[in-house]
Image (tube, coloured by chain):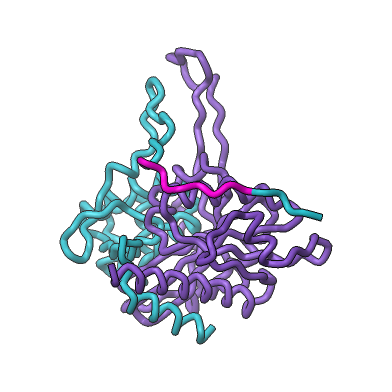
Amino acid sequence: MTPPQRQKRGPAPEPPPPPAQQAEGEVRNPERMYVVAGPDGERAELDLVTLIVARAADPPPSASPEQAALLRLCAAPLSVAELSAYLHLPFSAMGVLLTELLTAELVQARAPIVRRSRTDRSLLEAVMNGLQRL
Amino acid sequence: MDFNGSDTLPGPRAEDQLPHTAQSAAKIVIVGGFGVGKTTMVGSVSEITPLTTEETMTQAGIGVDDNFGSASKTATTVAMDFGRISITEQLVLYLFGTPGQQRFWFLWNGLFEGALGAVVLVDTRRLEVSFDVMGRLEERGVPFVVAVNSFPDAPRYALDELRTALDLTPDIPIIECDARRRASSRDVLMTLMRFLHSLAMTGSRT
């Protein structure tokens, strides 16, 4: 028996544009508008694995119930993905909520490590050492 | 949902909390068709019980100038399971099990662009469902390895034969695994890391 055959693809000349999301009267996908400062002062979009930490031990009285719930969750660092899971909120809704909290300086965002054209070898070695201990 | 009851909101168990020293996180994507074992693989290596993040996909009605509400739109909820491995006190690795269809990829901003790399999990009973996802990773320049999840009743092919069928260049690793076993899933991740490391070495010479 022979397995089915695939044809390899090369790199696309340009990344394919996202499907048209701005349908009439529709303003979805707000997360792309929000950016957070990275470690070098460079600005990065909120990522699934941006780590969020509350700046104070307790939510201020002015916080909405939604904000207070998030602030309690990230007393210790927690990724945006985990916050989304625990709060049962879609990832796109996290962008709105977190931008409010970042603007109010109630949380700190720690930018993720993303793939670069040349990935840092010491990072990969650290990950391999970590995996070996699993 | 009612956030007033937030005292009872589920959160990480005390032992699942990251240390305050956690400075940054990286992500790896495990991609494949439905039922291929993505969530199983995430669960077998994750230090936390896998969690689910959801996104709502809205599709506009076709050929309708919809000024009167959302009657002609359909919303679909798409879920993605993920897990976590603490690498050091400073560094955390997240694993996302992602549906293979490209239309889902835009829902999670930067999911593939920012990922260190990807594992394409294949099932030899339905090899062709992984063709499209591999093509898209190639188009986007996301480095990946192929892991063949060994189901007991699946046809067995030699890895060389699979490499030819999948049209993989000789440098792309392909390995067999049992996604249910932690050691086996860890080996898959190690294979990806070694591959990324070799790419970094090559890159530094040019």
Give the residue at x 43% y 69%: B196
Residue A7 counted in the magenta span: yes
Q: Position of residue B148 (x, y in %)?
A: 66, 64
Looking at the image, which is closer to me, B175 or A91?
B175
Placement of B202 over or under B54, stated as above or below:
below
Residue A46 counted in the magenta span: no
Looking at the image, which is closer to me, B74 or B39?
B39
Residue A75 visible in the displayed image: no
Furthest-bottom residue in view?
A: A133
In the image: residue A64, left or right of residue B124: left
Looking at the image, which is closer to me, B205 or A38?
B205
The picture quadrant where one finds residue B199 is bottom left
In the image: residue B189, left or right of residue A55: right
Give the residue at x 52% y 76%: B190
Give chain B's shade. Answer: purple
The picture quadrant where one finds residue B67 is top left
Magenta region: A6-14
How many callouts does the rendering have? 0
Give chain A's shade. Answer: cyan
Q: Position of residue B145 (x, y in %)?
A: 54, 64
Placement of A103 over or under A23, stated as above or below:
below
In the image: residue B137, left or right of residue B128: left
The picture quadrant where one finds residue B175 is bottom right
Looking at the image, which is closer to me, B156 or A96?
B156
Give the residue at x 38% y 38%: A29
Give the residue at x 35% y 53%: A67
Q: Position of residue B69 (x, y in %)?
A: 47, 19
The prevailing secondary structure element of the residues shown in magenta is loop
